Amino acid sequence: MGNCSQGCKDYFSRQKNTNIRLTLPVVCFVWQIAMIILFGVFIRYDKESNAHWVETKAHDNITSDIENDFYFRYPSFQDVHVMIFVGFGFLMTFLKRYSFGAVGFNFLIASFGLQWALLMQGWFHSLDPQTGKIFIGVESLINADFCVAGCLIAYGAVLGKVSPVQLLVMTLFGVTLFAVEEYIILNLLHARDAGGSMVIHTFGGYYGLAISRVLYRPNLHQSKRMQGSVYHSDTFAMIGTLFLWMFWPSFNSAITDHGDGQHRAVINTYLCLASTVLTTVAISSLSQKTGKLDMVHIQNSTLAGGVALGTAAEFMISPYGALIVGFFCGIISTMGYIFISPFLEKTLKIQDTCGIHNLHAMPGVIGGIVGAITAAAASESVYGKQGLINTFDFTGDFKDRTVLTQGGYQAAGMCVSIVFGVVGGAIVGSILKLPIWGDPADENCFDDEVYWEVREPATHHLISSQLPDEEEEHQESIPPILEYNNHMIHKQQDL
Amino acid sequence: MGNCSQGCKDYFSRQKNTNIRLTLPVVCFVWQIAMIILFGVFIRYDKESNAHWVETKAHDNITSDIENDFYFRYPSFQDVHVMIFVGFGFLMTFLKRYSFGAVGFNFLIASFGLQWALLMQGWFHSLDPQTGKIFIGVESLINADFCVAGCLIAYGAVLGKVSPVQLLVMTLFGVTLFAVEEYIILNLLHARDAGGSMVIHTFGGYYGLAISRVLYRPNLHQSKRMQGSVYHSDTFAMIGTLFLWMFWPSFNSAITDHGDGQHRAVINTYLCLASTVLTTVAISSLSQKTGKLDMVHIQNSTLAGGVALGTAAEFMISPYGALIVGFFCGIISTMGYIFISPFLEKTLKIQDTCGIHNLHAMPGVIGGIVGAITAAAASESVYGKQGLINTFDFTGDFKDRTVLTQGGYQAAGMCVSIVFGVVGGAIVGSILKLPIWGDPADENCFDDEVYWEVREPATHHLISSQLPDEEEEHQESIPPILEYNNHMIHKQQDL
Amino acid sequence: MGNCSQGCKDYFSRQKNTNIRLTLPVVCFVWQIAMIILFGVFIRYDKESNAHWVETKAHDNITSDIENDFYFRYPSFQDVHVMIFVGFGFLMTFLKRYSFGAVGFNFLIASFGLQWALLMQGWFHSLDPQTGKIFIGVESLINADFCVAGCLIAYGAVLGKVSPVQLLVMTLFGVTLFAVEEYIILNLLHARDAGGSMVIHTFGGYYGLAISRVLYRPNLHQSKRMQGSVYHSDTFAMIGTLFLWMFWPSFNSAITDHGDGQHRAVINTYLCLASTVLTTVAISSLSQKTGKLDMVHIQNSTLAGGVALGTAAEFMISPYGALIVGFFCGIISTMGYIFISPFLEKTLKIQDTCGIHNLHAMPGVIGGIVGAITAAAASESVYGKQGLINTFDFTGDFKDRTVLTQGGYQAAGMCVSIVFGVVGGAIVGSILKLPIWGDPADENCFDDEVYWEVREPATHHLISSQLPDEEEEHQESIPPILEYNNHMIHKQQDL
């Protein structure tokens, strides 16, 4: 240690302060107190969750407690809730030593995000002008979870490279931007997007990619030893994949109109996702010399069909139409992992840890296009006169809108979501570049030990491959496992 | 390596071509395209998922969107869906190095199978004679998942010994056979089998066992090092076990008649499964010298009660009746693992990786018998006059059937399912024996590295126990962990 | 081995007989047979799950099968069911080598407990005086699961230190005590406690802590090497945490009145839990020098808000009120892990493996207090005249009760649950102290190998830190991994 070589100097210059003992608690406390105050001022129970319902329901011609909307939204809500916390959380556990960060930070930012989303979405979508209050019910909870999904998608791009404080900042702005673009797309443009191809996936995808671009780390290869998966971490990730895949029909139908719309959205999503699995497997196998499958593709690209049907799921796209969408999404998403992700990293300097470009951004755009086309192609013969009005909500200010116009507004909506994602992400990325957030050094990325008490040290001899020569020699004389044991003894004595 | 001994020659002669880079993508693409075409020709939304519902529901005296059948089937559907993908998938992850294959191939064949099932079941059960179309809704999705379950059960018998292409072929024929036997049992014989003791479990069990018999591998002991579990793989398998166990009440009630039938099926299955757990634990503990429990039993035999109540769950078997069924199933299934499985392997040459004979085939047959007896013993005093008619659907052509006759037809149904399983499995097994499917060599069974890119090599020194003597000596001079490190370095440089 | 030192003598004197080959099967068989007999005598289907419903529903003015209560309780039931088996089971898998015991024994005692709970709760709450029968439906199943939850909480305190036979005895008495205290609190005192802050969590918490106190092990440090977690066991535990967290809104609303009550309980619990996550993270980060997070806190304290809202969830506590409860519970529970648990162990000799004092007992008491205060503060202006009557069920004998009186009875209810927990636990603990139950020696605690066939031996060199000197030297001459290999070969040849 006496004479410090160039490499050693680099080592020390790379050190960053990842101490978040001040910032993280302060942010959590201050923001949570702010939430309490804002909820106190603005948020109230809606009619159906208020104890006065026993009186108001009579006024609304509701005769029985079991007609409460709770019973017709809650099962879908719980499925969506599982997607947000278990689905997104475990999908990101694939890295060999970032499972705590994947599941834990996902948990943290979703829990903050859903509170902020209830406020932001409330102000934009359901503020009662008379009372100045926001009335929430089970549908608001679903919408809050949806809003959070956009931010969790963005987390996928920067997984392992940011601090929890940065993630909270990302979520604060992400939810804010989400509520605005959602308001523009759904309310002003009156585009339909029940499963959020545009509003959630396109926005969330580009938001994350833009942030990742601004936070580009030229020396990320220094934590190469921590990249990639181990056997059990890939198995954990499949828990996330499967819960997302299974409950995606609930995601795309959770807030569609009751009745045939919700029913149809489930059938379409179910079929589309099944189709995606087969083409994902096909392309994954084609991409290897001996036809072996790659877990990265199976974990991610199998979900692309659900993303791409987010807009059109409630439309009369017909069962074979859903299969076709899934067919192409599986192909495109898997090829994205093979060809586009390396290109993005090398050429555009976008380091996308989870490949959200392939799972959310691209399929989201496809979903927007599919939605625009199927909307423009809708007809009374397929939907029925009243069915067409119901499906596209051609009522009130929009009662004279034609399906062609609707298609145009759908396309416009997609552009809005891309612009909000890219521009918003660039701005937020710049904020996150400030050297105050406790982000890890390049060589400590993807390592839980930076932000978590890890009781069992990584079996570091098994994962580090670029040891200097001296250590290599050292190992030959003393079996490394002993060194490890000593380390353990040391650790345990400390406890 | 210069002079190749006899063992070494054996080694090379055992080599098989497991390259599936051509066959797997071709099968996936061609079949998926076929699905799209067939769906385009045949499959349409049913009344309640069609945008025209706003008009047709008035005709059917439905006044509110929340009376859509979607709301009364969908929660059960989602539970069944979880059982198919997480339940079956993770139950099979118990092997130390076959978790990718367990979860991944389960995912693949279920995704293909459910599409094919919608077509096959549609043609046999719900083809509209006027339009020549199949109209699908949420109940069709449940039935498709059920149909797939039969094939996933069969997968359990051949787990680790077949290629994904073989699995897809197995699923193609399995779904086809399933739809035919289901048509015979439910429509022609008019047997009741809401939870599929006969239709799903007995058929699926014998189908898998027959295939495994035809594909018998006399030298399977060569991959002995890969058999058995490791600590975490057993824990992963418990995820599968528990989701199957918890949601089995939904499985047995998902397509029963609305109202008391569905309610009763849940209660019976819930009780039966609880009882099974206690007797499984008892027998498992009895089977070991010191009373230790065996995870194999806990993972599998605890589920036997759900299988055995598949037929009778909707009947008035009474709560204590359900407990009795569970009581004996736990005993029989666990003793199956201890005594019958080794016997089947040695004497009948049936290699049954997951022990589906103990979990599905035997309990399925018990379920068929229990169903026949409880049907034959049904009476108006227990069911009520109309209740009896409703429960056994004694309407239309069957309105004069007596409960005794019904019992006979139930028994006949069970025989049909066994015959279809055994004969169908024997034929499909012969097809799968063709040397074109890329199945693994005996010594590479139960190893994910054959069909999956495994980033982290198995810590092979920890799992291989039958090294030739030379290597053993070699190890003493160089610590094996170093060899491993070198291997890692090599691997990572390739990336 | 020739000359046995003092330490070696200690070793042998510490040996205990953990052979449960007689006791465990006998208890399982006898109790299960007793259940069958008692179910045969007492338990029948209720009106809505009886085939006679087709006749009786007309009498009750029910016009459609889809009005069966099944459809409005079953989704919540399944969520609760997942919490009981996956939630509690996996939450306790955090120990490095006790995952089988955590998930497996949880499975066993829950399966027994729910049967016994149906009987005990039936006798106390719903025995039909005319027929002498207990009529069960889906709501009974939820209540049985709830009752079991109390015992699973208690399991958390003694995790790793007791035999499965002891656990079954604990559950037998636990369920019995539960039914009695529940009867006193809900029926006699007419306190409200839909989510069981008092009835489930306070009782279960103190019951477990009292048992743990009686079973105090002064030499528990001898199994120190088995305490603590490893990386993947902490990830498994997060599966439990998240399923508990996500489905807690279902837990607190599962048996509340249909309509606005159930709707409101979900919203309150959802918000409260979100708030808890932020303050848990804040305190956890504050407690470490560099602000690192501790998985123990994230796994447990994030759930405290759900516990604390068990009583008040259905009240008009208002959204910001729910956030405030969560805010403080996150702080208190996390500080409990940091400060109170070590104090309890050192001073009061309560060894609480999972920290149930911080997750259930304390938050449960908080929940009782919050419930009493919010009940006492209820007013007609907030609830509406009829809403107040409905929410607190001021009907029949209690129609003249004021909210202040109700608050008093709520507080009395909490005292009852504490007394039942402490006194009941002390008595049951004394029974469990008898030397006949096969509990493990101090140095074998927290080790699955005592009660489970573990195929893969623990990589014991990695987890044992207190080897005698001789062995340490031995290791330096022979690489330990070889020893391990030999052990494996030996093991596999035995199979």
Image (spheres, coloured by chain):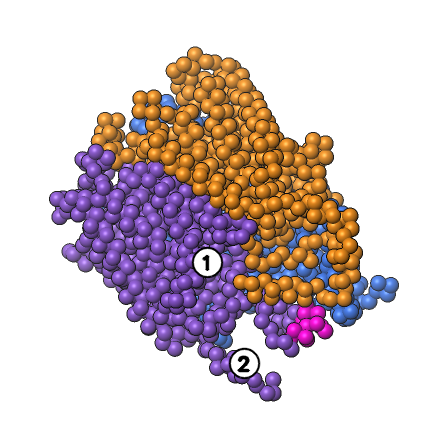
Chain colours: A purple, B orange, C blue
- Tell me if mark 2 has few (under 14), some (14-19) or many (20+) residues whose alpha carbon lies within 10 angstroms of its own: few
* Residue C62 seen in the current view: no
Measured from the top left, where is residue A431 in percent x and y? 33, 73
| Up-down relation of residue A215 to residue A230 (above or below) | below
- Residue C108: quarter of image: top right
Query: Considering the numbered disc 2 on the image, is that residue within a helix, a strand or a loop?
Result: helix
> Camera-side residue: A417 or C117?
A417
The N terminus of chain B, quarter of image: bottom right
Question: Which residue is rendered at x = 37% and y = 22% of the image?
Answer: C55
Q: Is residue B210 left or right of residue C123?
A: right
Q: Is residue A214 magenta?
A: no
Q: Is residue C452 left or right of residue A183?
A: right
Query: Considering the numbered disc 1 on the image, is that residue within a helix, a strand or a loop?
Result: helix
Q: Earlier in the sequence, mark 1 or mark 2?
A: 2
Q: Of discs 1 and 2, which sits in the foreground?
A: 2
| Up-down relation of residue A469 to residue C241 (above or below) | below
Question: Which residue is rendered at x = 54% and y = 35% of the image?
Answer: B170
> Camera-side residue: A252 or B151?
B151
> Camera-side residue: B441 or C211?
B441
Measured from the top left, where is residue B475 in percent x and y? 75, 62
Mark number displayed over residue B46: none
Instruction: Identify residue for label 2.
Output: A7
Measured from the top left, where is residue C495 in percent x and y? 73, 46
Q: Amino acid at mark 1?
A: Met
User: In this picture, which residue range is highlighted in magenta?
Assistant: A471-483
- Residue B68: quarter of image: top left
Mark number displayed over residue A92: 1
Question: Which residue is rendered at x = 64% and y = 58% of the image?
Answer: B459
